[in-house]
Image (cartoon, rainbow, N blue to C red):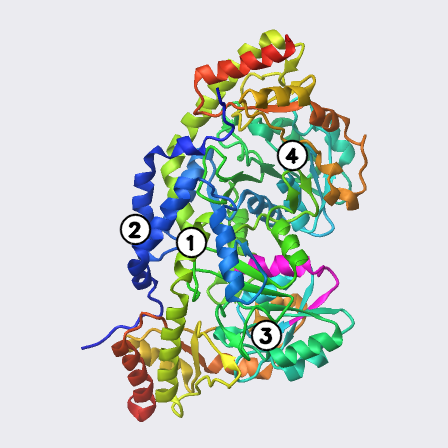
Amino acid sequence: MRLSVPFVALDVQQRLLKPELMAAVEAVLDGGQFILGQEVADFEKSFAALAGCPAAVGIASGTCALVLSLRALGIGQGDEVITPANSFVASAAGVALTGARPVFVDVREDLNIDPALIEPAITPRTRAIIPVHLTGRPAAMDRIGEIATRRGLAVVEDAAQAVGARFAGRPIGSFGEIGCFSLHPLKNLGACGDAGVVTVRDESLARALRNARNHGLRDRDTCEAWSYNCRLDTLQAAILNVKLRHLERWTIAKRRIAARYRDALAGVVGVPDERPDEFGVYQTFVVRAERRDDLQRYLAQRGVDSRIHYPLPLHLQEAARPLGYRKGDFPVTERLATEILSLPIYPELADAQAEAVIAGVTSFYAGRG
Amino acid sequence: MRVAFSYLDRQFTEVEAIIADIRGLVASGDYTLGAALSQFEERVAKLVGVRHAIGVNSGTDALMLALQASGVGPGDEVLMAPNTFIATLGAIVATGARPVFVDVDEQHTLDPARLPAAITARTRAIVPVHLWGNPADMHAIGAIAERHRLAVVEDACQALTAAIDGRAVGGFGDAGAFSLHPLKPLNVWGDGGVIVTDSDALAAQVRLRRNHGLRNRDTVELFGVNSRLDTLQAIVGNHLIDRVTAITDKRIEHARRLDAGLAPLREFVRTAPRRQGVRHVYQIYVVRARQRDQLQRFLVERGVEAKIHYPVPLHLQPASRALGYARGDFPACETEADEILTLPAHQDLTEAELDYVVEQVGRFYRR
């Protein structure tokens, strides 16, 4: 019997949680406080604790979280911000939207920014580094933090894929001046719509971000600095409060599937390892595969859905043309773009489905593909 | 008697049908740019009488994206009146353009007669605000824009179903921006906004820009924001949109009752002259009042939630310091800021409550 393995199965999780989620939605309705209600404050408190930070501020999306964070640090026109060439577009867009210039740096085989290449990219205009914890795997925060301190740069963590990840035992989001999280429906902790949150170590920065997400209003009638409307909806916060209760269980389940894939596929394809310092949360499980496109087609024929995150590196996107990069500038990123394949991974993935994924990959390379 | 400013608690009498639809959505997991959103966008377009409507994260974002899609950016100047909510200005600043203020006329909206003097070589757009639900003079503003080849982006955040000679606002300019904030007649259960336009090209630009500049899953055409109206919120909008005209009709009826009741007090409180052929939808009902602050206190003590929208004109906000304006630059706005008072007039008030408001205003001045 052929087993179908979809790439995402949000509907399964949602069906299980529906009674809890609907109760939370109805509680918001009864309260009628749709904008910055109590549920937002509750969520911020729980999330701050999770990220080991004194404060968290709910934002409308992960992208907006990046924009507001950079602006709160005074970054804008004329400044440069270092970020990896291999990420979702929002990491670079967040910089560009402030008026600053994204400066790309190549990645390591682990898909994260290569700390050894950061210093050569620093110029007198560099203001900040945005390490991305891609796939939920922590970037090398010890070395990045050391460089930032020595060179007087801010660190804004792009933790959009890394809720609950840790580096050297310390939660991701607590290393930089600000940690930016996406809570998009497909994230490990996902709302039922767009949502995001920032974690902050400094209370005055938290205050600035609270104003910045709300038109720059210090109080009802006083606007300190022109800003956006970028508030996390109370309704989404209520939903997130429910889901937060399940996050640890989901993370354990995903890590178990990741370990299983790693054991079974090592030597068949390049699998993500886990260094002793790292606690990854596997937003995606990305392997490096020879004849990647053929493998993807083969898997699809067997009912196993897979994706590529991301097929076109940021510096080669049309939007990056004014930045003046070319093919060849970031060789590791460019090579990885032809090799990487994301396999299905979610807490509800059944054992038989995981087996079907493993069997598909192994049989392809055993010559049956 | 307590006459509340907000009416949200009275609105949700048919919550069950909405919840049922949300239950279906929650099970499906189709949260982003889902089917209910397309349906909502079609309905808004039809309501306003334009070809396209695009759902975004807020009214502020609607303005920002409409301006960007109209080609407004760093180095440009955008004309607006300084007596509005700060979001109008925040949206202009977010594009990198510079806001240039122009004073208002007796309708509290952008004064077309003062526009030409503010136009420079860098002016790219005009943002007329249909303040409080009262349409700005779109015929005159449109003519000036055409003469100087300027874009017009209507800030219609407070003015859904407002109209001039039967034509809905939002459809006069190159684009119009609406807010779906919980206190609006067509609201969702959180932040939300919509851009309307007749231009296919502008609509395509906005769709691109609200979704990370993604032309498709893997190709980024430009660095854009993430500003999508949640499918969940579109479900709420779909349920409430059919009622919006009835709601605004009711508000107009209430405003007329207040107008009539306050007419004998016109030496103390007055409204802007009411115009033939103009449909003012009274997002809020505002009077200019003598001894405004004392009147407000008097009313609040007697249970009438009177408010001020807004006490500080934008050019005098701390955030405007860099723009270099000073007190005295916009006398009409500055004077009105000291006189305006918002009285409750929303659709769920009873005639007795409205009459109570009038009675209390009268009692204040005849003490």
x and y, in percent, of residue B336 in the image: 70, 24
Q: Check disc 2 and give the amino acid type.
A: Gly
**Chain assignment, label 4:** B
Q: Nearer the viewer, residue A369 or A265?
A: A265
x and y, in percent, of residue B155 in the image: 59, 37
Residue linked to disc 2: B24
Q: Quadrant of residue A177?
A: bottom right
Say what secondary structure mark 1 lies in.
Answer: loop
Q: Quadrant of residue B134?
A: top right
Q: Nearer the viewer, residue A43 or B274?
A: A43
Tag 2 near tag 3, CB within 8 Å: no
Q: Earlier in the sequence, mark 4 or mark 2?
A: 2
Q: Check disc 1 and give the amino acid type.
A: Leu
Q: Is residue A81 in the magenta section? A: yes
Report the residue at 49% width, 17% height from top.
Answer: B354
For the record, the magenta segment spans: A62-82
**Chain assignment, label 1:** B
The verdict on a common chain for dots 2 and 3 is no
The verdict on a common chain for dots 1 and 3 is no
Marking on residue B33 = 1
Q: Residue furthest left?
A: A1
